[in-house]
Image (cartoon, helix red, strand yellow):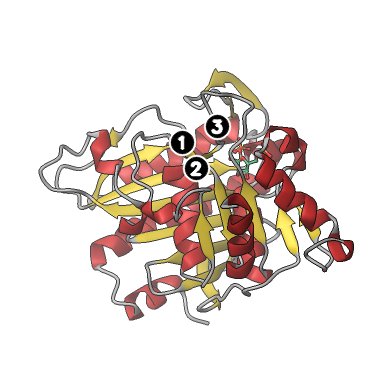
């Protein structure tokens, strides 16, 4: 089996970008070890603090964020960082060429129940003429990403990654410490009978979204005329990995719970990287109005609705929203 670095070299990935990816991988291997140790490593439980998202920070959130920061700040090609756990941009190296945005630990609510959790990352080229510490560096559309990926800390530790030439999955061989290629050029099936959404929010959705989901639950007796199954991992990495692996549609729609926060998932380090992975695997990734990778970011931690997965099912969902 090919290892990650050989595959990236075969794809002519630039040396300095390889260094950034290797650094991300090194951090994720350390997190994978801590996650496996769980309570034995003293990483469970919550702190007394909240992050800029207003979320209580788990010990593993802090540990993971610090690990990524320490390693990436020491990686010369990195110009600046943006993290779910950092209020503002963290400036790195003045001669750096790349920006890294990351959610160090996605699915934090699953940590204490031994559920699926992961790391999501997104890499851009730094812009000339703008200071590296400026938030404007990260106001690039998702279509400008040069690399996107996630690490899923599950029964096995998996890496899904794309540099724009298809989406591949690698499995960590913990005996050797290498990620080995286990799924090349992933293709998401165009149709599905499986959807992922947090149904407890249905009263907050738009009427059109409620209608779309209701028709899925009507199964053979309804207008879709086929039975649908539902899954919800409460960790985007786990749900998206299932979609990449066997198809499906993942939805976190806008809702009216909080007028100041009409959506939950973050554009920069959740929606955009997952959209790049999904589209490179032949799927679709939209917010409710537009293709996610074409959204023009306005703020570092801005949130968007996410509808992604099997192309024909995403199109069907959008047809309900565009009625
Ligand atoms: P946490 O990292 O705070 O657990 O949030 C995870 C997440 O951002 C995303 O990974 C999940 O798909 C989504 O939130 C789950 O949200 P709900 O808890 O509202 O279902």
In what element is the residue under mark 3? Answer: loop
Nearer to the camera, 212 or 61: 212
Query: Which marked residue is nearer to the observer: mark 3 or mark 1?
Result: 3
From where the camera sits, is residue 118 visible? yes
In three-dimensional space, the C-alpha distance between marks 2 and 1, rounded to whole angstroms, equals 7 Å
Point out which mark residue 262 bears. Answer: 3
Asked if disc 2 and disc 3 are in contact, CB closer than 8 Å, the reply is: no
Q: Which residue is mark 2?
A: 104
Q: Which residue is mark 1?
A: 84
Asked if disc 2 and disc 1 are in contact, CB closer than 8 Å, the reply is: yes
In what element is the residue under mark 1? Answer: loop
Q: Is mark 2 within 8 Å of ligand 1?
A: no
Please give left or right for residue 96 compared with residue 218 in the image: left
From what the image shows, is residue 307 above or below residue 226? above
Residue sticking out furthest to the left: 129
Please give left or right for residue 251 compared with residue 65 in the image: right
Nearer to the camera, 300 or 11: 300
In three-dimensional space, the C-alpha distance between marks 3 and 1, rounded to whole angstroms, equals 18 Å
Name the quadrant containing residue 319. bottom right
Image location of residue 256, percent across then percent down? 62, 29
């Amino acid at each position: 089996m090919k290892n990650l670095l050989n595959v990236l070299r075969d794809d002519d990935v630039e040396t300095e970008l390889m260094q950034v990816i290797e650094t991300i991988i090194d951090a994720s291997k350390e997190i994978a070890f801590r996650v496996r140790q769980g309570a034995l490593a003293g990483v469970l439980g919550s702190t007394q603090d909240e992050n800029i998202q207003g979320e209580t920070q788990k010990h593993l959130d802090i540990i993971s964020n610090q690990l990524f920061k320490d390693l990436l700040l020491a990686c010369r090609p990195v110009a600046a960082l943006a993290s779910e756990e950092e209020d503002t941009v963290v400036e790195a190296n003045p001669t750096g060429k790349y920006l890294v945005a990351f959610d160090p630990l996605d699915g934090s609510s699953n940590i204490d129940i031994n559920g699926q959790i992961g790391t999501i990352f997104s890499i851009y080229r730094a812009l000339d003429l703008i200071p590296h510490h400026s938030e404007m560096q990260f106001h690039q559309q998702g279509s400008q990403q040069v690399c996107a990926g996630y690490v899923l800390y599950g029964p096995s530790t998996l890496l899904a990654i794309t540099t724009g030439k298809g989406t591949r999955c690698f499995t960590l061989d913990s005996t050797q410490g290498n990620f080995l290629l286990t799924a090349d050029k992933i293709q998401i099936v165009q149709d599905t009978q499986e959807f992922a959404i947090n149904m407890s929010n249905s009263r907050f959705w738009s009427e059109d979204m409620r209608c779309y989901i209701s028709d899925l639950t009507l199964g053979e007796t309804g207008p879709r005329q086929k039975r649908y199954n539902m899954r919800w991992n409460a960790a985007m990495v786990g749900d998206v990995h299932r979609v990449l692996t066997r198809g499906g549609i993942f939805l976190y729609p806008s809702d009216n719970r909080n007028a100041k926060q009409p959506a939950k998932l973050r554009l920069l380090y959740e929606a955009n990287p997952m959209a790049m992975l999904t589209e490179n695997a032949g799927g679709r990734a939209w917010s409710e109005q537009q293709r996610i990778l074409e959204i023009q970011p306005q703020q570092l931690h801005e949130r968007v609705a996410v509808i992604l997965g099997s192309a024909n099912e995403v199109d069907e969902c959008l047809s309900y929203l565009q009625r």
